[in-house]
Image (cartoon, rainbow, N blue to C red):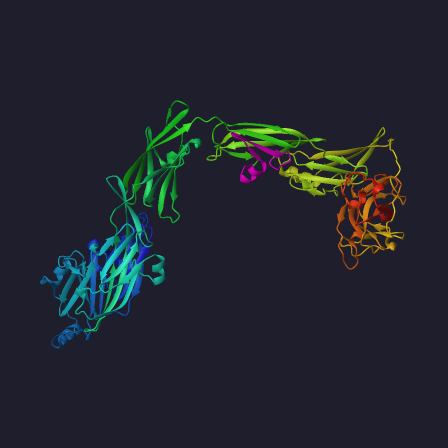
Amino acid sequence: VIRLSVAPLFEEVDAVFNDTQIINLTPGLATQCGFSFKFDPMGNAMFFASLQNCFSQNMVTLVTFRLPGNHMTEDPVYRVGKTCSYTPWTSREILCDRNYMEASEQSMPQWTCLQSRLSYCLQAVASGYKMTAVVFSPSKNVMNVDEVQRKGYAIANTPTRLVLRSPHNAEETYLQNVAGVPMRCSVGKMFCFDVPLASCFTAEAVAFTPEVITWYMPKHIDPLFSSDAFTMLEVYMGIDAKRLDTEEMAARNYSVLVTEAHIIVEIPVGAVGGYFKSHIQDDQYFVTYTIEPMLELLWIEEVAHEDTSYKVLFPITTPLMARPPQVRNYTVPEQAVFVLELGTFNLDVELLNITFPTMVLTVAECNARGFNVREQRSPDNTLKTFRLEVPFSDPVVFKEVAEQGVTTFTLQLIYGLVIFPEYAPFSHSAVVDAVLLDIVPPSVTGNCDQENFHITVDYRNQEPFFVVLVGKRLLNHEFAQQYLTEGDTDFTITLPFSSPDAVFESVHSSSVRSRLDVALLNPYNNMTIKYFSLACSFLKTLTECFSNGTMTALAVKVESAPGLNPGQLTLSDPACGPTYSDDRVAYFHFTVNSCGTTRKFINNVMLYENEISLPDELEVKRNATTSSGEEYQLKVSCYYVANITRTLAFLTRPRDNEPFAATGTGRLMVRMRLAQDASYNTFHQEEDYPVVRYLRQPLHFEVALTTSSDPKVALVLDHCWATLNEDRDSRPRWNLIINGCENPEDPYRVVFHPVVADARVHFPPHVKRFEAYMFSFAEDALEPSGQVFVHCDVVICDASSPSGGPCSGQCVNQDNPKRGRSSGLWLDAVLVIFN
């Protein structure tokens, strides 16, 4: 068999070409000459031709079909052709196709004729005999060749084969029950050869369930055998004349079982290789499933020693299966839209129009009206449904208002559908209702405290039917766990004013105006049910001034500058960028004698001013890419009193006891060194001082008791401070450590580092380490000396019996302890560092 596939094609084959001759291919001629066709609902076409068709030449077949084309062109046809050859031929070839059955036998000397007839037969064949009559069994009806051909048979002989082809419905065919399976048979006698034409199947050979098609084929087809002694050599299955291997069959869930009496083929309904077709009866929707399996058998008869190839192409169509379409109602009344889905249909069904009580609308008109008609396919692209959305507010919806705030919406419609390609119309009607309780919109209120927004949503006595949008973020479960507090009929969102969900409207010297937007949305169509906005001014120190001459400033991104990158902001000196920044703020830390800070005197006050902005080149670029054209400028300033006198009152009282060394007298040595890095492995030597450091570089100090090996002794840092000269009591002075703790007013507080025993440190309690950052004094701006001296007071304690105060441990109390009760000694250490 030759198979040709063409898609899409919704028209019949027009003709077949024989060399240069065009032969109109009528159904009768197709059957007589060995051609068949099949079309699925999607327009896919397959053409089958016997290799021994009327136009084959010496068993090498060239088949060219003419398909309907564009009649506006000069050549209104498409020509589709295929050339095939087939070897080796068996003694007997039998083919059962959808519209004919065909048999051919070898006309060779090995045919088993009687010896007396064999010589005559062979001589006739060798001399090119011409058949004049055919006798059909069992009717014994004798017809000449012309009469046989007029009845639709085909008879041909070649130097090697005799061919007889018969329609399935020919008068001379007969039904025979073979192993319980009805089969249609035809046997003819041509010249000196008996040709068992074929035994082909009827629909009764198939059994159906809603899930499985079962095809029974007799293993021993009686009319085709001369005896019961045979050997089945091959059994193959295929689809559409194409043989399948075992892996392909398993993937499609096909099965072939060979028993003593039958060959049984099982195919799942809906399996790959077939197709569904829609049908209408009495305006009811049905489907059938069609598939064309193929069986190929090869057997040899042991007595005659003749092999037979038997091929069946057997189109199977299930009975009508009811598939009443359903209208699924996905309407949520709060959405105020009917959402209907009609299905399920095969792909050959199309929706043409929808009839409402007052009008008929096509699909295009429905969509133009806002009904949103969509076709939806199944994941495997074999089924479809039709989805329709109709707003409650449309005039085609009937509205009925009842008592107690209940409104009923009713939609009546008739779907107009059609089955392709035969254009068979049918319809499906539906009536759907939606009951809607009158909903009181939730109320939203809010207020602010010193740090937070408080937004309260009161949804009364109804279940929340909305989602909450806070700023630009949906209120999800994680968000709610962190910021939401629930009540009986309400909930409150508490959010810091600096949250990324809020926006900064404006910035002032001591406050920030921040706004939080909250929207309640319909989850089905994202329409806004309620919108609420709350803006408050929050006291915030954006600029801090320190007595050591340093300033800090915080610049925030405001709503009017949406494209601003805070990390690109600088002080007046473009080289001074932020010490920290993110997408909302930039933090600056600098001294009043740097970064372009200006100073002027106003009476007894020194005013230091600077400005935070974008560098000129970035400002120009930003203005070119944004439409606002606004510049970002933030002025920061600090006031210092030039001359001031402060009065300090204090009282003294005698010590309760004098400090003493419990173990006797001795000499204690304390050494303070500056490490070269945070590892504290290498230190600067005496000749290295003064050591050069730049502003804000880290300084790693180590203070150690060097001459004691007493494990009960502990060293504690009591006070550490910095001066401009070597005099420990000189002014100005900046405290680094106060009462064993960091100076709380220092923007860069010292960091204490733990000490562990190693090859150099044998007694960790004898050593203390801390880290500070290099700075300069504001007074140093007038007469810069370039040096900073660091001093420390340390306390040597009895670690085994601490009695409070500094000896209780490093930074145990921010309050001033009673030193007189400490069992310790105060010592002093000093370092000088060059700025």
Q: Quadrant of residue 615?
A: top right
Left or right placement of residue 728 versus residue 283 in this view: right
Q: How many marks?
A: 0
Q: Quadrant of residue 164?
A: bottom left
- Image location of residue 588, percent across then percent down: 73, 40
- Which one is nearer the viewer's eye here, 292 or 624? 292
User: Is residue 835 visible in the rendered structure shown here?
Assistant: no
- Which one is nearer the viewer's eye here, 464 or 262? 464
Extreme top residue here? 403
Left or right placement of residue 656 versus residue 488 in this view: right
User: Is residue 686 visible in the rendered structure shown here?
Assistant: yes
- Image location of residue 18, percent across then percent down: 25, 60
- Image location of residue 514, percent across then percent down: 64, 32
Looking at the image, residue 670 lies above or below residue 747? below
Q: Residue at x 14, y 64 (%)?
A: 188
Q: Is residue 592 magenta?
A: no
Q: Quadrant of residue 579?
A: top right
- Image location of residue 505, percent across then percent down: 64, 31
In the rendered image, the quadrant that contains the N terminus is bottom left
Q: Residue at x 76, y 56 (%)?
A: 757
Left or right placement of residue 292 versus residue 187 in this view: right
Instruction: Please give the range of residues in magenta.
Output: 473-501
Q: Residue at x 70, y 41 (%)?
A: 617
